[in-house]
Image (cartoon, rainbow, N blue to C red):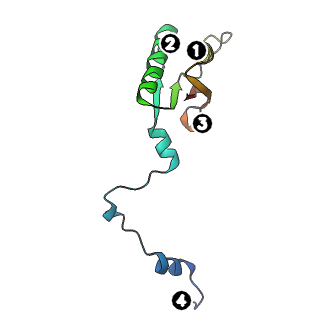
């Protein structure tokens, strides 16, 4: 028998609940499946280079990529900033340095990279996919 609402018409939601029941979130003890984006963020390391000089930032990037390889991480978010405090002619110093390192020096560890999504820093951050 199909459940009916006050108007006497078929109620799809009640039918679904009758068939599948209701999940007791308290019984799960806080253990729920992580959605895809959450699990990806948890498997990603993040390094913030704000306020560092180029040589210090380069050392930090090398160290973090080495950590990623040791821990089996495949994704890294490098926050370098948008270059607002850089020389207008030179452009964003750290962003340029990071991208050059990823292409030349660290190319054997890097599968690909791209600017981060706006929610992760946009042009002020680079997502690195490691081999």
> What is the distance, in whole Å, between disc 4 and disc 1 at their CAs?
66 Å
Q: Are marks 2 and 1 in contact (CB under 8 Å)?
A: yes
Residue 17 horizontal/vertical position (percent): 48, 77
**Mark 1 surroundings within 10 Å by alpha-carbon count, few (fewer than 14), some (14 through 19), many (20 or more):** some
Q: Which residue is at the front of the view, 118 or 115? A: 115
Horizontal side of 123 relative to 75 (left or right) equals: right
Secondary structure beneath dot 3 equals helix
Secondary structure beneath dot 2 equals helix
Question: Against 32, is 27 above or below?
Answer: below
Q: Is residue 108 visible?
A: yes
**Residue at mark 2:** 58
Secondary structure beneath dot 4 equals loop
Question: Closer to the observer: label 3 or label 2?
Answer: 2
Q: Which residue is at the front of the view, 48 or 22? A: 22
Question: Closer to the observer: label 3 or label 1?
Answer: 1
> What is the distance, in whole Å, between disc 3 and disc 2 at their CAs?
24 Å
Q: Along the polypeptide, which appears first: circle 3 or circle 1?
A: 1
> What is the distance, in whole Å, between disc 4 and disc 3 at their CAs?
46 Å
Question: Against 101, is 27 above or below?
Answer: below
**Residue at mark 4:** 6
Q: Residue at x 59, y 86 (%)?
A: 10
Secondary structure beneath dot 1 equals helix
**Mark 4 surroundings within 10 Å by alpha-carbon count, few (fewer than 14), some (14 through 19), many (20 or more):** few
Question: Against 92, is 55 above or below?
Answer: above
Q: Along the polypeptide, which appears first: circle 4 or circle 2?
A: 4
Give the numbered dot on residue 101.
Answer: 1
Q: Is residue 51 visible?
A: no
**Residue at mark 3:** 118
């Amino acid at each position: 028998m199909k459940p009916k609402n006050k108007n006497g018409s078929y109620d799809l939601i009640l039918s679904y609940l009758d068939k599948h029941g209701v999940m007791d979130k308290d019984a799960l003890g806080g253990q729920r499946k992580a959605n895809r984006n959450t699990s990806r963020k948890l498997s990603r390391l993040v390094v913030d280079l704000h306020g560092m000089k180029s040589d210090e930032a380069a050392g930090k990037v090398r160290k973090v990529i080495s950590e990623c390889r040791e821990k089996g991480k495949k994704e890294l978010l490098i926050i370098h900033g948008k270059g607002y405090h850089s020389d207008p002619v030179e452009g964003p110093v750290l962003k340029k340095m990071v991208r050059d390192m990823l292409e030349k020096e660290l190319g054997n560890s890097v599968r690909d990279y791209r600017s981060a999504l706006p929610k992760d820093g946009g042009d002020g951050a680079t997502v690195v996919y490691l081999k």
